[in-house]
Structure formats: structure tokens, C-alpha cells
Amino acid sequence: MKLTILLILSLFLMKQGTAQSQIQGHVKDLKGKAINSATVTLKSGDGKIIAYTRSDEKGAYQLKVPAVPTNGFSLEVSSLGYKREILPVTDRTKSYDFVLNESAIDLPTVVVNNRPRLKVDGDTLNYKLSDFSNKQDRVLGDVLKKMPGIEVATDGRISYNGKNISNFYIDGDNLLDDKYNIATKSIPKEAVDKVQVIQNDQPIKVLRNKMHSDDVALNITIKDEAKIKLIGQASLGAGLPNRFDENINGMMFNKKYKGINYLKANNIGNDPAREITSHNFSELKDRLNNNKPGTILSTGAAGVPDLPQNRYLFNRAALLNVNNLFNLKKDIQLKTNLYYLLDRQQRDYDKFTEYYLPSGNVSFTEKQSNTSKPNQFRAQASLNMNREKSYLNNTFISNYNPMKYQVGLNTNGTPFGQQLQQKAFDVSNEFSYLNTLKNGNIYNLYSYLSYSSQPEKLQVNSGLNEDQLNHGIPYSALIQTSNTPAYFTNTYLSFKKVSSGIIQTYKTGFSFQAQQLNSTLNTIQEDSQIQPAAIEAFNNLKWKRSNLYTEGLYEYETEDEKLKASLSIPLSYQYIHYRDPGYALDQKMNKFFVNPGVRLKYQTGVENYLQFSYALKNELGTMDDVYRGAILKNYRSLYANNAPLSEQKNHTAALTFNYRKAITMFFFNLQASYSRINLNTISSSILTDNLQQRIVLPYDNNISAYNLAGNVSKYWFELRTTFSMGLSWSQSMNNQFQNNTLLPYKAINNGIKAGFQSKISKNTNLNYGVNYNLMESKSSVNQEEPIKYKQLRQQAELSFMPIDDLFLNLSAEHLYTKQSGQGRLSYLFSDLSARYKVNKINTDFELGISNLGNIKTYRTVYLSSNAFTSGTYEIPGRIAMLKATLTF
């Protein structure tokens, strides 16, 4: 670590001894109109290119000039449709303005060979959508997954050459933030001209060329004919048994207004909540640095089966989604995003769970019929001003998510019912203002405020565990309540000093967090009286955290832009006070932390780079670590704490190599990472066949993980096919206390994936994908063989057009699973659809049959550390749907 810091400081000092200057000016036509993207080249006396750039939308340009004599140097400006102009360079401090004359363009004959091409323009890679689409595709998302270098995960998350995108733009405007599934599942592919991948994306104009960015963004450009009208679809679908699927949407994308608005409803297993997934939520949490309390109680339901959601979900859902962006005055935007989701989901399953322990295995059975009614309401309004010298953004968000669960359950032969109600609410406002001073330096004023509450009530209609909870006396029911109101504020001021050597950023701020945990566990006696449980199961905990922090960030870049380095040194002083009079608990803590981080990026070629990062992060625990009263998390899990506030130290290091050759459409990336977490607490569980009691104890605890992954993507022109392949390996080591025994565990996961998307002919397409995973888990305490879990998943899809406007699609999915000591599981699902397009009325008629084999039960197995779980789920059988879709 010390050697790395010394290396960076040495580079910084070397840079201070190297001077450079800038040549700047404007490029306009005879009418005084700015010429965008004109090429500006600085040449030496013998014609060698010293530097080059392009003019921006205002016609302005800036050229970095090395500290060498400029005798005989000249500036040359050219742009399509204009005559080339040349001016001699006589003074570095002078502004060189060009006025270009128009010229006629004689275009040579072009031979079109129908080969897809990628165009590279600086940090932007351009895909022509029509090069990768076919007549069977409907929306943008259908085409994205065929593009080499771009990967679309099952949840819709988009990554480019192994790196998740940070922003999604529509003609340069950020309409949807990170909820871009709304666009990929709605925008017709006919409306899109190009897909642009923007590396080193910096959306804030003030910070461009003044702050390093490794972010990757995606921008789609809309065709001119689609900008001048409202576009959309209306569809009606009905099917057997008792199925419906309706949707109406409208969208517009012009310079002043962009909007995607729709209403949809279905009961065929398509969960509209997936369209409002926030793909960068973890990054947002890290940036806000606020440990907001989450839900505490649950029904203890099993996880969902490892199937595509539409194969297992019984639902009845509706979603209203309204997204509008208005470009007001120049560089000022007003954006509103609102949605309301109403759903009813049903899940029925049988489950068997077994824990492998040296003192003897523990197992239990469970059968649930679970009805849930999730509701989500979100309203967001943003005002944004994004100019060359200043930036302002204010975002207000309100969320309300009431949930209801009704559960019929049988565990180990005991039947009973459960009801759970949750009413999560939060409201927040985020403000950021940046301005440029006369000397070119930048200051940033930031403020964030939030309030949230999470009232919950769980009722278990059975006298379970009467010995522990009711002095051995039979009783009728349990009622667990909890609420966690929380307030948080964070304010800071930062100053960025921009110079030709090191970009320095200094930030200082203060955050304050106030939270409460109020919970009670009561019993309902057989005579209907309500009494407290026999154990200490109440909490009235008050928690406060104050954080005073400052940070220095130093960024360096060589003149040839091959090496970029950054060093961050955050300092923080935290004061925590928590108390609960019911347990005579009153604790205070003061801590000072230094959390350094370093990042190095070396450009090994024009399109390739090697990147290294290291970070040390010290963290203190949360309110969830220190409550003393027991909480019935679900019908069989009782949690409490008997330890001081947890402290952890996290070391992470990562190395990435990223390679591409755009002209041949070849992409490759390799990633390696290591993390080690040192904790002062450990979770201890006492497991029986009907109850899990967990308590946190003071105990040194180390967790480490290694990860290695590589991916390759290539477009084969002769076969008109995109091939992709990926390999992954990971190893994690952790400790658990179970039934008073310390169990060190090692888990290893090996994975391989491969696939292709092929345009066999003009009217025929074939897609195939395969994923294989081998997981292994072993404890050094157990002398038995490691537990192994294997899964193979294959997916294939054939689509073809036998006659004009008739589209046939056949798809299949095969899943194979093998668990140590268990039998093999194998399932084959298949679907068939036929769609006919009536061009005169712009309407498609589609008949689809899913789950042709009419599979109605699905069994799956899971492996985690020393636990084995087998679940059997009821799933929808064969479904037939007839659907009409009008496009306008």
C-alpha cells in the first residue's frame, strides 16, 4: 500500500515539472452559425500531427499543446461540406477562429455488402440497430442482446464488455434514471436509429475534462420520422384457463419533450414490477451512506424457484407508469416519474430443509399456501440545469409500499395460519449545485434529507413453542409488531482545483442519523387475553449517529492520456449513542477512521486498458446489531443480540483487463478481485426442528473471498452470428456458530456460459445459450465428503417467416440438477407462437401456447454452506393466449 502511494506521488511530482498550454477558438460558417464536430488538427512544419480534437455544439474547440517550440506549426480545420482552412500558429495565447466556406460534395459510388459495422468516435462506439435486428424483433431489448460486446441479464441489467452501464440516455436525455427496463421493453425497434456506448461518461458538463470517470453509459438515438409524432401500441389478449393480458402505451421523443407512459395488466405470470427495477440501487446506497432500516418481519416463505418468472408466477397485476421530461429554457429540464403497481400473487409449495452439523443433523418440513398483495407507489420530480459553467439538480422522491400476506402453513405436521402487514413509507430530497469560479476552479454544495417509517405486524395463529414463549402453557396465537422510524441528513461543501497537473478535490461535510426500533411480542391466550411473551421480547431503542468527515481526492493524467491515477483519502469522525431504558442500555462510542483508496488505469492500446483498484473501508454496525429484546422475525426464527456494536474492516482489491477491436467486433475482458472482512462479532444460532434462535456474540470473525471471471464476445461476419462465452470461479471462506459449535466453511463456485444469436437467413434466426454451474461446500469440522451441487441450463429459440408477415417462434428450455446424495432432476419446457401482421390496419394477431408439456409441479434443490433445501412448487400448466396488437 505504501509503495503504491509513493508511486502515485512520484508521478504527481513528475507532472509538476512538465508544462503545457492550450490553443482554443471557434469554428463557424459564413452566416456565423457554429459548426459542430469539425476536425481541428495541429501540425508541425514537416506535416506531422501533434494534436487533434473536434469542435463542440457551440463550435468551440480546445487543443492541449505540449511544451515544445511551435515555430512553423499550423492549425488545419475541415468539416464535411466545407472547404478546408489553414492558419499558422504564432502565439499560444491567441484565439484562433475559423470561418469555413461551403463546398459541393461529390460522393463516389458505394457498394453495400450488408455487413454490420461499428463506428468509433472518441469515447463513443456506435451500433446501427438495423444491422442486428430482423423482422421478428419487436422492441429495443430484443435487439440489444444480439449486439457483440453488450450483455442483457435476465433481470434486464445491461453491461458492456463486463461493466454495468451507469446511465441510459434517449437522444442524450436521462428520462428514466436507472429504471431503463421501461425503455428496453417498450420502445419499438423501428423507432431507434443507433445504440451508442459512451465510455468515460460524465453527464455533468461542468466536470467534463475536470474529473476522471470510468462509467459506461448507453445512448439511443431516435429516427427523425419517429420524433415528429406520437408512437405506441394498444393490445388486448385473452386465453385459457381464464387468462388476460392488456396493454396501452404512448411515447414521444422530440427535442423539447420526451415521454413514455403506459397502463398494463395481466395474469399470465409477467410481473410488471420487473420493469421498474432500479439497476444501480446498490451504488445509490453507497453514495448516500445511509443505513436505512429495512423490513424486519416476514412469513418465512421459501425462495422462488430457479425458473424464468413467467413459468412459476401466479399473479393478477396492473401497472400505471408515467414518465415525462420537458426541456424548458436552454439546458434546463423538468422531469417527473410516477408509477403505481397493484398485484396479487399466489405461491404454493412443499419444502424440506436439513442442516448438517457435527452434533447431529437438524431438519424440518414445511407446506405453505402463500397469498401476497404487494402495492407500490412512487412519485419523483427533478429539476436539472446542466451548463458549461454551472450545474443544479434537485430531486424529490416519495415512496409508499403497503404489503399484505395471508398464509396457510403446515410445519412438521402442525397446521396454522399467518397474517403479515407492512406499510413502508419514505420521502427524500436531494440537492446539488456546482459553479465555476473566474479562475476555473469549481465548488459544489450538496444536501440530502430523508425520513422513513416501516410499521409491521405479524400474527401467527398457533401456540408454537409454548415452552419458550408461554411458560409451557398452551396458547392460541402470537402477535409481533415493530416500527423503525428514521431520519437522515447529509450536507457537504467541496472545492475542485483544476490545473494542468493534478486535479485536486477537497470535501468537508456533516451527516446525522436518528433511528428508533419499537417492537413487542405478545401472546393471545386461549381465553383471548393478550399478554407479553414469557421471554424478554420488547424494544424501545433510540439510536443516533453523527459523522464529521473530510476528504482529499487527487487525480493525475499523463499528457498522452495513457495513464490515469487517483488517490482518495477520506477522514471521518463518528459519534454513536444508543439507549434502551428497558434493558439499562446506554452506550456511547467515538471512532476516527481513515479509508484510503487508489485507482490506476493504463491504456495499453487505443481500445484496450488495464485497471487496478484498492480500497480500505472501516465501518461501524447499525441499530440492527444492538437491540436486546427478542424479535420473532418469522414463525420459526427468534433473533436478539448480546454483543457490543460491530466493527468491521474491509480490504478490497481488483484488477481488470479490457480489450476490444471494434472493426472486427471482438470484445474481451478479464476480472480478478479479492476481499477480506475483519469483524468483532459473530452470529450464533441454536437450531431445532421447530425453532431457530439467533444471537450476536462478541467474537473475532474473518470473511474472505476470491473471484475470477472472463468474458469474450465476437461477431462472425460470414455466419452473421454473435458468439459469446464466459468463465467464472469464486471461493469464499466464512465462519458460523451453530448449536454451540464453530463451523469454518469454504465454498467454491465454478461456472461456464456460452451462446450465440444467429441470422441463418433473411427470414430465419436461431438463438442458443447454455449455463453450467458447479458449487461445492465443506467444513473443516466435518470429515464427510464435500457437498456438491451441479446445474445445467440450456435455452434455444428458433424463429422464422415462412411467408410474408407470418412469424413463427419455437423455444425450449432444459434444466438439469444434481445434488450430492439426491436423485437427478430434469425438466424440459417448450413454447410455440404464431403471429400474423395485417399491414393495412397496422395490427398483429398472435396465438401463443406456453408450457406445451403441461408441467404443473417443479422440484428444485438449493445448497448454502451446510444447509440443504428441497422445494416442490406448483406452477401454471399449459396456457393458450390469443392477442391483437395495434401499432400507431
Image (cartoon, rainbow, N blue to C red):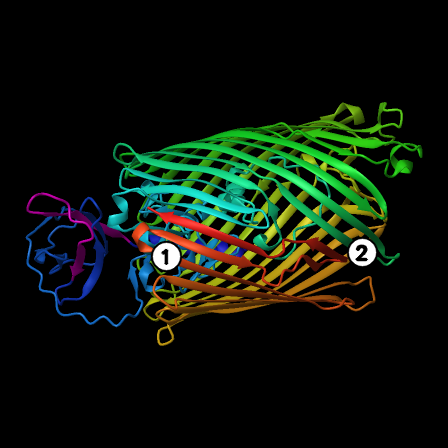
* Secondary element type, mark 1: strand
Q: Earlier in the sequence, mark 2 or mark 1?
A: 2
Say whether residue 338 is left or right of residue 291: left
Residue linked to disc 2: 354
- Comparing 870 with 692, the one in front is 870
Q: Which residues are magenta?
A: 19-43
How far apart in space, not on screen, are marks 2 and 1 (Cα)?
54 Å
* Secondary element type, mark 2: strand
Amino acid type shown at disc 2: Glu
- Comparing 841 with 469, the one in front is 841
Amino acid type shown at disc 1: Lys
User: Disc 2 vs disc 1: Cβ atoms closer than 8 Å?
Assistant: no
Residue 406 in the image, given as x and y percentages of width and height: 71, 37
Q: Main secondary structure of the magenta part?
A: strand
Whether the magenta-drawn stretch holds residue 24 is answered as: yes
Residue linked to disc 1: 837
Q: Residue furthest right?
A: 472
Residue shown at 42%/54% (left/top)?
A: 845
| Res 308 visible | no
Residue 801 in the image, given as x and y percentages of width and height: 39, 66
Residue 243 in the image, given as x and y percentages of width and height: 56, 47
Whether the magenta-drawn stretch holds residue 691 is answered as: no
